[in-house]
Amino acid sequence: MDATDKLFSGSIPEIYDRLFVPLIFQPYADDLAGRIARTDPASVLETAAGTGVLTRAMVSRLPATTRIVATDLNQPMLDHAIAKQPQADRMTGQVTWRQADALALPFGNQEFDVVACQFGAMFFPDKIKGFSEARRVLKPGGHFFFNVWDRIGNNEFADIVTASLATLFPQDPPMFMARTPHGYHDVARIRDELTAAGFSVISAETVDHRSKAASPRDVAVAYCQGTPLQNEIAARDASLLEKATEVAADALARRFGSGPVDGLIRAHVITAKN
């Protein structure tokens, strides 16, 4: 993983939340929140909360008495999530926001009924350590819920954007999407690493959704400017960020048309128990 893969700062949080969240994250947040609600937890720890899409989905499905602690490594993402939280939810005090590293959680042993992570495990530099920390803070019988993207070839928009940028930077194509978000898709490996972390009951389900946007341009902006892919493009030539976005939009338009677009997204949803 490149050092810039974990940098969600500057203009990225706003674009990420405005375009990327509805494009690919919302349906999986709703799915994960529903699974969590069925366990009737009294306390939930969320790691890699980002701009809070799963947090908000959990608030809408869990009783107000359920304590939610939402954490992320990137303070700018948390700041955006806090600002996005409805005033009514702030008044209840149900959610506590805290900057934290999922590999070194600042919580005691056996504090939570559920640990949840929405598309964050791919960013863990040490997957077993991250999973071990989740297990450490879980109560006996607690659940660890998380999801990861399937391989990039099964996620149409990400695949097309990545291929298009290789035409602009043929000597050194930006590979963030393939390398990190879509780089941890081997379910057998995930099972092995969860087992190494101490989990004994593990299940995995592959879930498809449709990714929809008003235009190819919205998709291109979401990927090229609302993720650390922006950092990769800028590292090659910051003046080409808009050109890269146009190249991606053109490639998407050739595949899906110039109007509203609709592409396959596929992820694995993992449940592990103590």
Image (cartoon, rainbow, N blue to C red):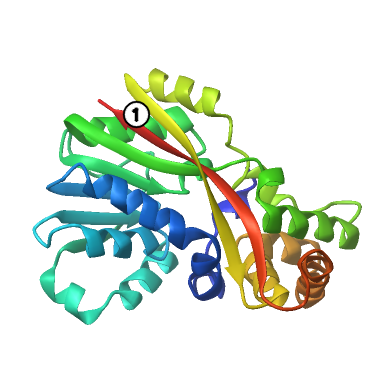
Quadrant where the C terminus lies? top left
Q: Is residue 166 above or below residue 79?
A: above
Q: Amino acid at mark 1?
A: Ser
What SS does tag 1 mark? helix
Q: Position of residue 222 (x, y in %)?
A: 62, 69
Residue at (18% x, 78% y) in the render: 88
Residue at (68% x, 67% y) in the render: 224
Residue at (41% x, 18% y) in the render: 196
Q: Position of residue 40 (x, y in %)?
A: 15, 45
The residue nearer to you, when weighing 194 against 99, is 194
Apparent side of residue 262 relative to residue 13 in the rendered image (left or right): right
Q: Is residue 209 visible?
A: yes
Q: Residues within 10 Å of mark 1 (few under 14, many from 20)?
A: many
Q: Position of residue 66 (x, y in %)?
A: 13, 55
Apparent side of residue 40 relative to residue 71 in the rendered image (left or right): left
Q: Position of residue 105 (x, y in %)?
A: 30, 42
Residue at (30% x, 45% y) in the render: 35
Q: Is residue 10 above or below residue 128?
A: below
Determine which residue is flagged by label 1: 132
